[in-house]
Every structure is written in structure tokens, then in C-alpha cells.
Image: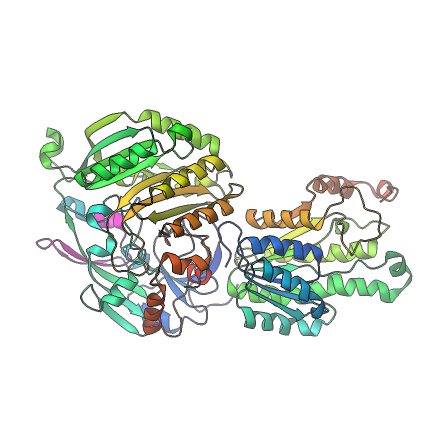
Amino acid sequence: MPEHEDGTYRLLTGWGRTAPTAARVVTPDEIEGIDALLDRAGRRGLVARGLGRSYGDAAQNAGGTVVDATTLASIRDFDLARGVIRVDAGVSLDALMRLLVPFGFFVVSPGTRFVTVGGAIAADIHGKGHHVDGSFANHVESFTLHAPKGTFVVGPEHDPDLFWGTAGGMGLTGVISEATLRLLPIQTSMLLVDNERVSDLDDLMQRMVEGDDRYHYSAAWVDCLASGASLGRGVLTRGDHAPVDALPDRARLDPLHFAPRALLAAPPWAPNGLLNRFSIRAFNELWYRKARLHQTGHLETIGTFFHPLDGVRGWNRLYGSRGFLQYQYVVPDEATETVRATFERLAREQCASFLAVLKRFGPGNPGPLSFPTSGWTLALDLPASVRGLAPVLDDLDRLVVEAGGRVYLAKDSRLPPELLPRMYPDLDGFRELRARVDPSGVLQSDLARRLEI
Amino acid sequence: MQDALGGVQTVLVLGGGSEIALATLRRFVGNRTRTIVLAGREPEKLAPAAEELLALGATRVETVAFDAEATDTHVGLIDDVIERVGDLDLVLVAFGVLGDEAEAERDAAAASEIARVNYLGAVSVSVPLANRLREQGHGIIVVLSSVAGERARRSNFVYGSSKAGLDALFQGMGDSLVGSGVRVLIVRPGFVHTKMTAGLDPAPLATTPEAVADAIVRGVERGSEVIWVPPALRVVMSVLRHAPRAVFRKLPL
């Protein structure tokens, strides 16, 4: 291993556990340490890493430095009256929710609480409420960014180019050290949820178009192995934060109770191919049958509604040593045929996705690399060991580009670089921004190298 | 960079004239490979291969001179290639000579040429390769070994012993590189129909450059450490390796 003055040389992967590369991982004990690391980063540069929930290679930097920012995790300031909190970027959404929910506040939440605030901004994450809330950066008042050209405190009004460039910028504009977030008020820690079992894709999409506006949160699970008349069958789940009077009497005593636990841990090793098209088909059948045709107004906890997989620690290990990848795209509202073609292709190739989630996004924000834009977003978890997966995904890329859509960089681990400017037309604007704050190219990652960002 | 599904963007081939290498590159270019460096003893002879790869979709193919026996040039060569094209995602070690076994058994110069190219050349070039890939923190080294190296046969022991050395070298190197982000894939084909073996009697389970290339692509995807082509040779060689000397030397191999 190369000698390094500090840090440990380690193999890193994203959550999908594919394409490991080695980097020097350093853990600064104070925010001031970040600037020194940027100064001494060397030829192969530096990138910040949070809890490693990006699926691909966004928080890897082969041969360079990776700053583990999870130790910088203090709460700096909490203004209950305004509903605003200032925190270090290494604070996880799990820690944040454990603090905030009992006070009646919530944040934009993705499918896991185990992401940091810094990562949430860098990937400009979204949740089931995007059509109402927008993405994470829409709730950020300001943040502090450490770049080679200096330390910047930016917000939507103050240096908006750098603010929006960093939102979704995958850590390539600098290291975020702290952020001020505007919180969403909630009355209870429960959600009032409606479930609908839907027997085909047209019906599912129609229900989403007609009814999503009535709910704060909406997403559909789709059985991607179903074909023919059942193509796109699934379960549509929509809900709102429950008001106090919706709770049963006993729960009203402590309406903001929040104490999620991981119930299980995945075994440390699983064979490749445990999640194959047969086991996934069986699971899908069960999941579809289990859902009631129509179930309204039942109560779910924040954990069950938003973060079902957080209940199983290390669930990514279930895909075996080859790992898995997530393919998530968004296409404009009118491109319903692209969504249909995706399910047809997956069903035809018998490419089983354990989780296929369909959702409608609201309008996007100005971030040049921010993923969400108006339209249909589909996320697919796929085992990397599926034979012939690469050409299938290459074909899906083409469909997505032709429809005017894009894939999500926080999930990506295999997009070819030539498609990136077509998916993110303001890529050159982003490059100019990087040239301004990082002219010598200190901020680097495997994702940036692979996609020639 | 390497991607999640075995795609590699930049590839260096040492022994750019190898038919197995060319067949492998055709497949890589069909996936993510865009930049290729072909290194061979006579770079001008690599032009047709370079043109073909460009036509297939590579955006940059360079040919450079590489002489396995000129060991003092190896460090400079690897440095120069990386200077020109950046990170090497995959290096295919495909050079080697079969030699004429009968001549090698009579003529010390002929025998040592086989050893110098196949083994000494590999030892020499492996050092800068491992160093530079370790520095970049990622990379795949694919080595064309041979089943001939698993147990030297009386009919081609000079070649076999050189491949045995090569195979052992890269096995050890692969283990020493664990944790560095660099991995080594050793490929042990049986008899392959190529210009190198033209005119020889094919052994049982003979294969083609295309089949070896397919196996390499799968091995890279899966992160394999050793593959046999065809796979049945793994079992055959396991039996042969354990056969008593007295039996082995009588086999018509």
C-alpha cells in the first residue's frame, strides 16, 4: 500500500457493492481540518463521503483521498419558533429525525434515514413527497462549502450558482461542512395511508395522474415480472401526516413518539443469485396478493411508511458478492410509453427487479445536476449477476434520452459518459462552476472520472 | 474507470498482435471501451487492428513499440502510456512465443529466448504495472497463461515451464494486490487455433480466440481470479496435475 501521512488505505464501494477501488480515508475531527485536506490532496484529489448510500461510485476516489464526514455531526442551532435548524453536514437523517420528530418537525426523507445532510444536498435527494415538497435542496436556507478557492456560505439568494450547482453536484464543487434547513411541521409521527392494489399499468398511471394531488406522499410498487394483461400491476401507496385526532386515544398521549429500531440484520454473507427471478417472482406474487384491493385511512409509523428497508441492517448484502445496482430515471409526463416499454423489456428479458418503484415528480429546481424534473420516475434494483444486464440497461438509456429524460447519478454505476450531456443539458454550466471554485481539479471521484464530468 | 457490470473504458494490450487480444478488444469496444493502446514488437503491423477497433466504435487507438526482451525499457513504456491516456482500467498481458520445442531442446539460445520473452519479460513489465495500478487505486490485469504451465509435459516443457513461471508470478502478485483495488485474472486456455499454433496438431478440447475472449469478458464481469477455457479443462488439468509421474510421462500428451 502507498505510504500516507494520515488516514487508512481502504477499499470502498457504494451501497450496491460493485466496482471497489482503494483510497486513503481520512476522518477530520474538526471542520477546520477540511481546508488542510483540500490543500494537501495531491494529484488524485479528494471527495467527501457520508454514510455510503449512493449506489455506485459517487463517494469513491481511486488512489486519492476520501473524507469521511460522518464524524462532523454536531447540532449547532435549533430555532423552534421559526422551524429552522443548523447542523454539521455529517449529521444523519436518522439522528435528525430522532431529534426533530418529538418537537413536531420533519425533513424531506428518502427511502432510508441513513444518509447524511451533506450527502442529501450533494445528491439533492427526494422522497415520496416530491410533487409537494420538491427535493432536499428546496428546504436548505444556506450551507457552508469548502472548496480549493475558499470557503463559501451560499443560499438560493446568495451566490445561487454555487448553491444550485452544489445541490446534486455529487460533491464535485467542494466539501459541505454545515447546513441550515427549513423544517416541515407535523402534528404526529404517524401517517394516514391509503393502499390500492392495481391490476395493470394504465390503471396505475391514471390513478396517479388523477389522485396524487390529494396526497402529500405517493409512490407505487410495481411487479416488473408480470407481463401481458397484468403488465405493470402493483400497489399504490399514498398518505399524509396524520393529524392528532386521527390517532387512537392511547397514541394521542404521545402523538410524536418516534423510536425506530432495526429488527433484523442481514447475514454477513449471501450467495450470488439468492435474489433471482424465481425468488423475486415469489416475493412479488406474495406482496401483490397481500395488498388489499382498497384500504383507506390506516395508520403507519414514519419508519414503516418511509424506511421499510432500514428495518433490515445491511440488506445490500443479500445480493451476494457481485452486488447489485439501482437504475432510476425520470421521463417527462407525456412519456408514458417509455415507462411501459421499460416494463415490457424487463418482463421479456426476465430481468427481475426486487424493488420497482414508480412515482410522479413535481417540477425540478435550477440545479444543473439535480435529478428530479417533472414526470415519471422509475427506480429498479437489479442484481449485477443477471446475465446480459448491461445491454438491456444500455437500451433503456436510449429510450430515456429519446424521451428527454435522465438517470439519477446518486444511483448510477454504469452510464456511458457520452449520454451525460444529453441527460443534463447544463453540464457545461456545471463545469464552468467547478472551474471557478476548483480550477486545478482537486475535487475528483470515480463517478466524475467515469462520466468525464 | 471500471463500471458495475464489467465495463472498462481504457485498455492497454501488451502483445497487441495477439488474436485472442483482438477478439477480446472487439467485445470490450462493444461495451464501454473507447481508448486502447496496442503495444507490440512491430507496432506498424498493428495498424489494421487499430483501424478495425476504431471502426467498431473505439475513439482512440494508439500503437506503441514493446519488446518483452528489452527489459530496461519497460518502466519507461508503462509511464509513457499512462502519461498519454491516463488511468489504465484493464491491462491485457498477451505477449508470448511458442517457439519450436525440438529446437529449444537442442539449442540453448532458442530455449532461453522462450524463457526471456514469456517469463523474464513478464517479470520485468509486471513491476511497473503493479506499481502504477496500485497508485491509481484500481485496475484489472488479465494474463494469458496456459494449461501447459500447470504441469510441464515432455512434449513442450520449455514453453510449459515459462508459462508455469508466468502463472505463478501473477498468482502471487494477485494475492499481494488484494486490498489495493487492483485485481488479477489468470486465463488458462488449452490449445487455441491461432497463427501461433498453425500447423500443429490440435489437442483435445481445442478452442478458438473468440471462445477465450468470451470467457475473459465473463471473468472480468464476475471478478474471477483464474479461468480455464474451455471450463472442462479445469477438471482435466486437476486430474493430470495429480497423476503419478510414472503414469503422466507415459500419456500421449
- In the figure, is residue A203 to the left or right of A420? left
Foreground residue among A153 and A410: A410
Q: Where is B216 relative to A300, above or below?
A: below
Foreground residue among A41 and B214: B214
Q: Quadrant of the C terminus of chain A?
A: bottom left
* Residue A373 pos. (x, y %): 28, 52
Q: Quadrant of residue A425?
A: bottom left
- In the figure, is residue B244 to the left or right of B136? right
Residue A29 appears in the figure: yes
- In the figure, is residue A132 to the left or right of A273? left
Q: Residue A74: within the magenta?
A: yes
Q: Residue A433: within the magenta?
A: no
Foreground residue among A34 and A427: A427
Foreground residue among A30 and A17: A17
Q: Quadrant of residue B230?
A: top right
* Residue at the image point whose x is 83% and y is 49% from the top: B153
* Residue A261 pos. (x, y %): 28, 39
Q: Residue furthest right?
A: B106
Residue A259 appears in the figure: no
Q: Coloured how?
A: rainbow
* Residue A450 pos. (x, y %): 46, 60
* Residue at the image point whose x is 56% and y is 46% from the top: B222
* Residue A252 pos. (x, y %): 10, 34
For the record, the magenta segment spans A73-97
- In the figure, is residue A152 to the left or right of A53? left
